[in-house]
Amino acid sequence: MIKQQFYIFMLGTLIYAWFFADALFTGHYGLVLFWSLLLIRKGWIAYKADRWIRLNIKN
């Protein structure tokens, strides 16, 4: 993942977390579910990327 892709990924995660918190604090639980699913998906992608990077690091 190049640096620009990382920044876009990080910005998207920040936006998802912002809307998740807003929905949670305003009581819109349908939106909470929607944003939490998107955050879980982002976390899973980050986990897979981290695992791939650790396996492919040249020692």
Image (cartoon, rainbow, N blue to C red):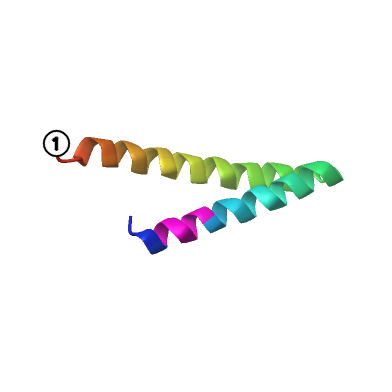
| Residue drawn 77% across the image and 49% down it | 22
Which residue is most to the left?
59
Image coordinates of residue 29 in percent, x first then y, are 78, 42
Quarter of the figure that contains the N terminus: bottom left
Q: Place residue 11 in its image quadrant.
A: bottom right
Inspect the image, locate mark 1, and give the three-letter code of the amino acid beneath it.
Asn
Q: Secondary structure at mark 1?
A: loop
Q: Nearer the viewer, residue 55 or 3?
A: 3
Q: Is residue 12 magenta?
A: no
| Residue drawn 63% across the image and 52% down it | 16
The magenta stretch is 5-10
Above or below: residue 4 compared with residue 34 = below
Image coordinates of residue 31 in percent, x first then y, are 74, 48
Q: Place residue 51 in its image quadrant.
A: top left
Residue that carries the numbered disc 1 in the rendered image = 59
Q: Is residue 6 magenta?
A: yes
Give left or right: position of 27 versus 56.
right
Q: Nearer the viewer, residue 24 or 5?
A: 5
| Residue drawn 23% across the image and 36% down it | 55
Badge 1 density bin: few <14, some 14–19, many ≥20, Cα 10 Å: few
- Label the magenta part by its dominant secondary structure: helix
Quarter of the figure that contains the C terminus: top left
Image coordinates of residue 28 in percent, x first then y, are 82, 46
